[in-house]
């Protein structure tokens, strides 16, 4: 016996990144959906504003952090997308004490 | 082919020696058993501190280093501007800004006493430092909280050190090496020293796993492994590993603004005790992680994780910054400082062995002191007037000659 639905493939879902919709299917991670849409970066470094996205892809490097439904520092490579997830990019500026 | 100088160790000290010597026209080869900047250089925090140094020769060297770092960073930035231009210029949209930034940040250090007993020793220490020309400003709790709003307000004393700074040590060492290569130096990694080439008493090069390397002189800059390498050359040098661990949090908004440590740190760095000592050192990196140190223990080159050490460091850090209780730890790492019994670097010729020069023993201060130590060594090597008095750092001082040596320690 299988509990899978009989009618066709995985269920489609939609998330937004900074308001922009991204389409995917159930089971994909947020990073997976973004990469599938050819989006390669979604975070910027504090010092130089350089782009960052998936580096390790396995939850170790913390380069792919995003805010999901208001909770910050979520690893996009590990979080499975849920339909309607509101995803936001993060940028943490350096404090104004550096030269 | 005989080079003028072969440098053993491609950490920040070896890199600095190589750069300083090569820029004076000498033919230099750098050897490292593993990779460039892969040992102690890659396993610390990038501290450029005057705040933790007692008045004395090490402080004099640190004050010279604090003056030298800004101009050195500017030199390297300018010199390496076109490095890796093709790889990095396009994507970043900033052609010409090729070499990774050294993340040199003169952020200043804040030292806080957290116990009643610790307050007066910190004040006395700062007063002695002021007498030696250090900018050590005793500040009240309100001023400390203005500098570090997340600091635990239950302080008993605080001293602000504007001269403390931070650098990304691996980037700094790689930049020094890149500069050395541009001046003609060769860097060979994966090459281990196995013995000496001698002409009578004189050292005339090295036997290595990559073949013989004849050289006019050898500079031993192998950090905590210097004692082991010296033994392979038939020389005793009392440099021992002093282990330290660091906790790394996940990225977070920049809350910790300066180098912040508790007053116990000074006592810990100056102690020769082999037993575990911890003191809290907390700082943010440009990447947004917070580094939490520090620990000191003499357990040889044992790389096994000790959770008890991490626990003690974390507890101390939370005492300084209560918000860290909710921080997530991403990883930890450990490294070995090159410890010398009298806590002073060893820089200069070894009069016992003609042809042998030494630049090591900086313990936890090698990132800050490395560049000026390399320049000091090059001054001595070429007969130039040294920028600081080299006598306290000489190889043939009693504490070095009398120090007990571990020659059987397996270099890991």
Image: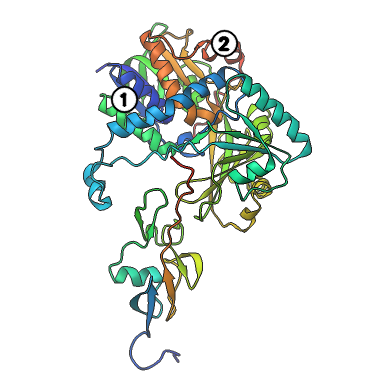
> Residue tagged by mark 1?
B211
Q: Residue at x 40, y 72 (%)?
A: A29
The image quarter in which residue A25 lies: bottom left
Closer to us: B188 or B365: B365
Residue B229 x %, y %: 46, 23
Q: Residue at x 45, y 92 (%)?
A: A1
| Chain under callout 1 | B
Closer to us: B329 or B97: B97
- Label 2 and label 1: CA atoms lie apart by 33 Å
> Residue tagged by mark 2?
B397
| Chain under callout 2 | B
Q: Residues within 10 Å of mark 2 (few under 14, many from 20)?
A: few
The image quarter in which residue A4 lies: bottom left
Q: What quarter of the picture does the N terminus of chain B occupy?
A: top left
Task: Name the element at disc 1.
Answer: strand
Q: Is residue B9 left or right of residue B411?
A: left
Residue B32 x %, y %: 38, 30
The image quarter in which residue B146 lies: top right
Asked if labels 2 and 1 share a chain, the reply is: yes
User: Does residue B221 show up?
Assistant: no
């Amino acid at each position: 016996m299988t509990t899978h639905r009989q009618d066709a493939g995985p269920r489609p879902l939609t998330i937004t990144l900074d308001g922009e919709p991204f389409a995917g299917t159930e089971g994909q991670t947020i990073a997976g959906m973004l990469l599938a849409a050819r989006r390669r970066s979604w975070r910027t470094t504090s010092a130089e504003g350089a782009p960052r996205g998936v580096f390790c892809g396995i939850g170790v490097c913390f380069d792919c952090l995003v805010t999901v439904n208001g909770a910050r520092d979520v690893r996009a490579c590990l979080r499975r997308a849920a339909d309607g997830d509101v995803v936001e990019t993060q940028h943490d500026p350096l404090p104004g004490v550096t030269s | 082919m005989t080079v003028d100088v072969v440098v053993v160790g491609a950490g920040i000290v070896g890199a600095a020696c190589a750069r300083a010597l090569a820029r004076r026209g000498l033919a230099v080869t750098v050897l490292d058993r593993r990779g460039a900047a892969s040992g102690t250089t890659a396993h610390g925090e990038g501290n450029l501190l005057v705040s933790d140094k007692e008045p004395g020769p090490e402080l004099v060297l640190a004050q010279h280093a604090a003056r030298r770092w800004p101009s050195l960073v500017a030199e390297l930035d300018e010199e390496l501007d076109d490095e890796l231009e093709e790889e990095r210029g396009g994507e970043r949209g900033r052609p010409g800004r090729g070499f990774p930034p050294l993340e040199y940040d003169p952020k200043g250090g804040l030292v806080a006493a957290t116990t009643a007993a610790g307050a007066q020793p910190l004040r006395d220490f700062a007063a002695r430092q002021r007498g030696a020309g250090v900018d050590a400003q005793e500040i009240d709790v309100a001023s400390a909280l203005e500098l570090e709003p997340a600091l635990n307000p239950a302080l008993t004393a605080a001293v602000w050190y504007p001269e403390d700074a931070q650098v990304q040590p691996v980037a700094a060492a790689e930049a020094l090496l890149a500069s050395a290569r541009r001046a003609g130096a060769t860097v060979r990694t994966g090459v281990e020293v196995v013995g000496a080439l001698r002409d009578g008493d004189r050292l005339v090069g090295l036997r290595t796993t990559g073949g013989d390397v004849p050289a006019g002189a050898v500079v031993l800059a192998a950090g905590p492994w210097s004692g082991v390498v010296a033994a392979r050359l038939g020389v005793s040098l009392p440099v021992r590993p002093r282990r330290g661990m660091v906790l790394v949090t996940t990225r977070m908004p920049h809350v910790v603004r300066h180098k912040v440590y508790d007053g116990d740190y000074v006592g810990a760095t100056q102690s020769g005790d082999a037993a575990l000592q911890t003191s809290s050192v907390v700082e943010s990196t440009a990447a947004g992680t917070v580094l939490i140190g520090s620990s000191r223990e003499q357990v040889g080159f044992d790389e096994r994780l000790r959770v008890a050490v991490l626990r003690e460091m974390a507890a101390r850090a939370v005492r300084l910054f209560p918000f860290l209780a909710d921080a997530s730890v991403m990883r930890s790492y450990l490294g070995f400082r090159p410890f010398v019994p009298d806590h002073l670097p060893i820089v200069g010729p070894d009069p016992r062995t003609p042809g042998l020069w030494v630049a090591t023993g900086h313990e936890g201060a090698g990132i800050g002191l490395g560049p000026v130590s390399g320049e000091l060594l090059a001054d001595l090597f070429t007969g130039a007037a040294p920028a600081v008095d080299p006598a306290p750092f000489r190889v043939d001082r009693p504490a070095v000659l009398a120090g007990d040596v571990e020659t059987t320690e397996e270099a890991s």
